[in-house]
Every structure is written in structure tokens, then in C-alpha cells.
Amino acid sequence: MRDTGRRTTSSEPSRQEPTPMPRLALYALTVCVLSVAAAVVSFVQGSWLGIVWVLLAGLSSNMTWYYARRGRSVS
């Protein structure tokens, strides 16, 4: 017999479990948190190297956002 394409539906709506955050997003989030901490320490010590840490925090924040969204859309 051939499939008619009809599917039986149950009376209750299907519920999806929330997907865990992808591993790359967690790594990027860790880098973001650590670079913010390094920027704070650097500025407290009076070093202008903290600017580099702030830029790295911004980049890793965007990577976290990207990989988290990509992981949700794929699953």
C-alpha cells in the first residue's frame, strides 16, 4: 500500500524540550566572561591593555549569540 500523506494527530499538542546550548556557544561564553574579568583587572591596574580585552569580549559575545541561535534553529 502507498502512503497517502495523512498523519494521525493526537489530541494534545506536541511539546518540544528546550535544546541545550551548543558546545561552541559555551566556549565562546566562557571566553567572553574571562575577557571581561581580564579587562576589569587591567583597567584597575591602570593598563590600557584592557581595551584589547574589551574588544575580545565583544567578539566572543557575538560568537556566543551566533552559535546559540544557530544551534536552536538546526535542532
Image (cartoon, rainbow, N blue to C red):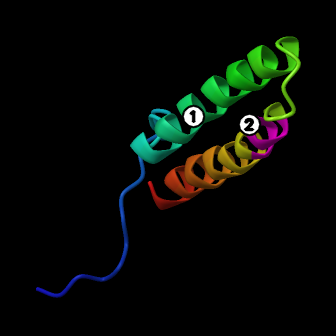
Disc 1 marks a residue whose amino acid type is Val
Query: SS for tag 1?
Result: helix
Q: Is residue 10 left or right of residue 55?
A: left
Q: Position of residue 2 (x, y in %)?
A: 17, 87
Q: Residue at the location (81% across, 31% down)?
A: 50
Quadrant holding the N terminus: bottom left
Real-space CA distance between mark 2 and mark 1, rounded to the nearest whole angstrom = 10 Å
Q: Is residue 14 left or right of residue 62?
A: left
> Mark 1 — residue?
31
Residue stretch rendered in magenta on the structure: 51-55
Q: Position of residue 7 (x, y in %)?
A: 36, 65
Residue nearest the observer in this picture, 69 or 16:
69
Q: Is residue 18 left or right of residue 5?
A: right
Q: Residue at the location (54% across, 29% down)?
A: 30
The answer to whether one can see residue 12 in this image is no
Disc 2 marks a residue whose amino acid type is Trp
Residue nearest the observer in this picture, 65 or 45:
45
Residue nearest the observer in this picture, 3 or 17:
17
Quadrant holding the C terminus: bottom left
Query: SS for tag 2?
Result: helix
Mark 2 or 1 closer to N-term?
Answer: 1
> Mark 2 — residue?
53
Q: Residues within 10 Å of mark 1 (few under 14, many from 20)?
A: some
Residue nearest the observer in this picture, 59 or 45:
45
Most frequent secondary structure within the magenta stretch = helix
